[in-house]
Image (cartoon, rainbow, N blue to C red):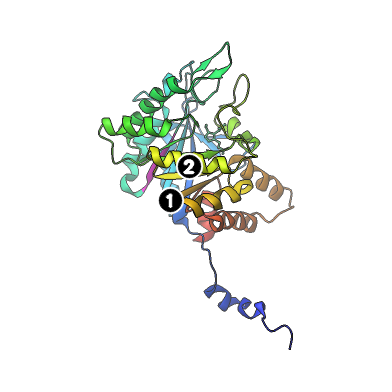
């Protein structure tokens, strides 16, 4: 008799439920928020339908909405009023992210984990992720580390529950860990953007966060999309320097990287389903070419299946509503 093994036996609806290997839960979802000091009402982001920049005064109510949907964490990005060469407005007590973090913490307390993106590109006039030497058009690694340490401490002071350095500077995890520790924040975990690729998929984010660069690109510090072994080295180093969670970014075009990292290190691993991944699906859905809800679900489920424990996604509220 042929076929002897019939895989379809396990595919009737109730049996399929029992043999399902991956589940997507709202517990795994992190909601990214753009807080803009220059506005007083929410502003649409044209390249990211459904996503808004919010004034700091509305951060708490938006985070409350996410919390009511069961989302456990937000990640905050700031758009400051003033930029300079060193990104000074990234670390003041009353700067944009610090203000938003404080308000969210006051409103929601332990009901919402506040993660903050620690990087300089939104705060520098040149838009790079560190201080630069204009003549050589170089981003200077070591002088940037001190500043990142100060930024992380200012976030913790304002109520951040976790910091997420995204600048891809060498040694940033160790620098931030030691600043946090020496300022009595040894309990604040670090989620490192460990394997962050130099990706065109960040395009819409740069509109959203006003963080495009004035010269060159980021390929001198972010990873080459052609490389995979290098991602393992990045992660290994970050773990040695004290990272508690490592991240792969972008997500969908880099599921192989996610899989290898989780398989090798077994450490809590995050994936960032980035702006371009979101905008592609939104655009196709708006044209009626893809069914939005099911393509969103399938994408996020795939990221989880590949090894992510948690996912930063602009679909956060939509998927939370779907899963409810
Ligand atoms: C800042 C940062 C970027 C993103 C997150 N943090 C942009 C960049 O590196 O240019 C991208 C997120 C997205 O595309 O959704 N360094």
Q: Position of residue 50 (x, y in %)?
A: 59, 43
Start-end of magenta stretch: 112-117
Q: Is the residue at mark 1 in contact range of ligand 1, meaning its CB lies under 8 Å from it? A: no
Q: Position of residue 233 (x, y in %)?
A: 50, 40
Do labels 2 and 1 touch, CB within 8 Å?
Answer: yes
Compute the Cα span from label 2 to label 1.
Answer: 10 Å
Name the foreground residue: 292 vs 262: 262
Q: Position of residue 247 (x, y in %)?
A: 49, 44
- The quarter holding residue 243 reads top left
- Sequence-wise, which precedes: disc 2 or disc 1? 2
Q: Could you tell me which quadrant the N terminus lies in? A: bottom right
**82 shown above or below 210:** above
> Would you say 225 lies left or right of 18 here?
right
Q: Is the residue at mark 2 in contact range of ligand 1, meaning its CB lies under 8 Å from it? A: no
Q: Residue at x 28, y 34 (%)?
A: 181
Mark 2, residue position: 235
**53 shown above or below 84:** below
Mark 1, residue position: 267
Name the foreground residue: 161 vs 269: 269
Residue 46 can be seen in this image: no
Name the disc covering residue 312, or none.
Answer: none
Q: Position of residue 277 (x, y in %)?
A: 63, 44
**28 shown above or below 129:** below
Question: Main structural element of the magenta stretch: helix, strand or loop?
Answer: strand
> Would you say 277 lies left or right of 33 here?
right
Magenta region includes residue 204: no
Magenta region includes residue 116: yes
| Disc 2 element | helix
Name the foreground residue: 211 vs 2: 2
Of the four image quadrants, the one with ligand 1 is top right
Q: Residue at x 55, y 51 (%)?
A: 260
Label 2 packing within 10 angstroms: few (<14), some (14-19), many (20+): many
């Amino acid at each position: 008799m042929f076929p002897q093994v019939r895989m379809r036996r396990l595919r009737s609806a109730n049996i399929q439920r029992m043999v399902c290997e991956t589940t997507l839960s709202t517990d795994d979802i992190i909601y990214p928020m753009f807080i803009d000091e220059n506005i007083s009402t929410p502003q649409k982001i044209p390249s990211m339908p459904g996503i808004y920049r919010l004034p700091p005064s509305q951060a708490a109510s938006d985070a409350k909405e996410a919390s009511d949907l069961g989302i456990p964490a937000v990640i905050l990005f700031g758009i400051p009023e003033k930029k300079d060469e060193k990104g000074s407005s990234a670390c003041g007590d009353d700067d944009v992210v610090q203000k938003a973090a404080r308000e969210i913490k006051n409103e929601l307390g332990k009901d919402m984990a506040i993660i903050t993106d620690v990087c300089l590109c939104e705060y520098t006039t040149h838009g790079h992720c560190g201080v630069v030497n204009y003549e050589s058009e170089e981003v200077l690694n070591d002088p940037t580390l001190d500043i990142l340490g100060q930024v992380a401490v200012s976030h913790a002071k304002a109520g951040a529950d976790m910091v997420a350095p995204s600048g891809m500077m060498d040694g940033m995890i160790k620098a931030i860990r030691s600043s946090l520790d020496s300022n009595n924040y040894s309990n604040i975990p670090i989620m490192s953007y460990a394997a962050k690729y130099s990706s065109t998929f960040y395009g819409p984010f740069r509109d959203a966060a006003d963080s495009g660069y004035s010269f060159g690109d980021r390929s001198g510090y972010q990873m080459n999309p052609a490389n995979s072994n290098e991602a393992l080295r990045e992660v290994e180093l970050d773990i040695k320097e004290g990272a508690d969670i490592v991240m792969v970014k972008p997500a969908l075009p880099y599921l192989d990287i996610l899989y290898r990292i989780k398989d090798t290190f077994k450490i809590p691993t995050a994936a960032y389903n980035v702006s371009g991944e979101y905008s592609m699906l939104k655009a196709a859905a708006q044209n009626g070419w893809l069914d939005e809800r099911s393509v969103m679900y399938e994408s996020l489920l795939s990221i989880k299946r590949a090894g992510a424990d948690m996912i930063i996604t602009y679909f956060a509220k939509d998927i939370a509503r779907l899963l409810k």
